[in-house]
Image (cartoon, rainbow, N blue to C red):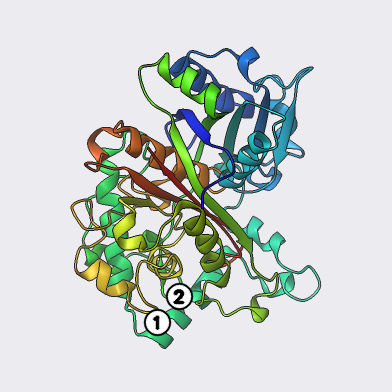
Amino acid sequence: MGLPEKVGIVGTAQTKYGITKNKTIPELAYEAVTKILENTGLTIHDIENTISSSVDLWDGATASGAFLTEVVGGVMGSETRVADDGILAAFHAVLNILSGNFDVVMVVAHCFGSRGAHYDITNWVFDPVYQQMLGLDYLSSAGLQASWYMSKYGLSEEQFAKVSVKNHKNAFNNPYAYQPMNLNVEDVLNSEMWSYPIKSLDAAPVSDGACALILASEERAKKIAREKGREPIWIKGLGNCYDSHYLGDRDLIECSALTIAAKKAYELAGINNPLKDIDVAEISEPFSFQELLWLEGLGFCDRGDAGRLIDEGVTEMSGELPVNPSGGMLAGNPFIVAGLTRLVEAVEQCWGEAGNRQISDVETALAHGTTGPCGQMHCVVIVGR
């Protein structure tokens, strides 16, 4: 089916992820912006619109996006702000270009996750009258989701731990990753229990960082990329979907929003068999069990069958479907930045520029982002050469 017009990605950039103690919000974003302009040979004046992604509570500052205007070239220019995961800012950028209003759009996402009480602030996403007073947050609600997943489909804590072991090991190949670790299953199982069955090593660590992406219309993308001796990576398909606000109105392990978003993306990209048609997947997993649950929602296997994929090594870097060769969120990408980082990693895999984490012969890659408790929103983007 395809997009009505081709949209290409011509540049990517990331900062090193970790705890940032001596930088301001503008300085953190500026690092990603200057790096991507250098990588593409563009100047800030070549950017026709910038879309920035941030959330005040993660940054510990009111209207934190206001600090970015000068950094992203928004003074006397065009700037849009998205208070959601960075992959949705990229989704918005694609629509900007398809509208015909812009030919070159830069997307910048940043997060200072270390500036607040990491999970306490996620209590704010719940209904203020009935649910916030219960103390629900991303962690406690994910514990409910994981428990139901185990109960209904028989997955085990050991299988969740294997995801953590795999991703922390992969992170040794990623110079941007925050927490590469040599772990075994027992290490994960014996780590501190946070919200049954989630232990500390099942959860993405607190971190800070920024990343950026530049997208362009077909002709501009070819011209920009050609000057750097490469080809653009094309957006083949994309889709996003929000589920209900109230947890009680959702079946937390059916991943309805993810299934719908993936279906839209696959139809546009002409994907009929995800396991065979996709060479590598970068999936946002704030908690280890969610990588398995999202694999099912993305259609890589039947419901309840993702445990087999991790047991058989299908998702290892040498497996049939490498998942998160970058190490993913478990290796240290913060919320808000995580989804855009997945897209940056997918693009670099298609370029063959992913360094030691490179998967051979990648032509088609999947990037996934999510926000909200238990995966309330999902966005899926398919990219390829």
> As rendered, which of 299 and 251 lies closer to the eye?
299
Task: Give the left or right position of residue 357, taking residue 373 as reference.
Answer: left
Above or below, 135 against 82 in this view is below
> As rendered, which of 209 and 115 lies closer to the eye?
209
Residue drawn at the location 70% of the way across and 19% of the way down: 70
Residue drawn at the location 70% of the way across and 61% of the way down: 125
Above or below, 81 against 251 in this view is above
Residue 18 visible, this orientation: no
Q: Position of residue 88 (x, y in %)?
A: 61, 47
Q: Position of residue 181 (x, y in %)?
A: 27, 48
**Amino acid type, callout 1:** Met
Residue 121 visible, this orientation: yes
10 Å crowding of disc 2: few (<14), some (14-19), many (20+): many
Cβ atoms at labels 2 and 1 below 8 Å apart: yes
Residue drawn at the location 47% of the way across and 37% of the way down: 19
Estimate the spatial distance between the alpha carbons at disc 2 and disc 1, rounded to whole Å.
Answer: 6 Å
> As rendered, which of 361 and 29 lies closer to the eye?
361
Which residue is labeled 1 in the image?
Answer: 150
Residue 126, quarter of picture = bottom right
Which residue is labeled 2 in the image?
Answer: 146
Q: Position of residue 244 (x, y in %)?
A: 68, 71
**Amino acid type, callout 2:** Ala
Q: Position of residue 50 (x, y in %)?
A: 66, 28
Task: Give the left or right position of residue 158, taking residue 39 as reference.
Answer: left
As helix, strand or loop, the secondary structure at mark 2 comes to helix
> As rendered, which of 174 and 215 lies closer to the eye?
215
Residue 294, quarter of picture = bottom left
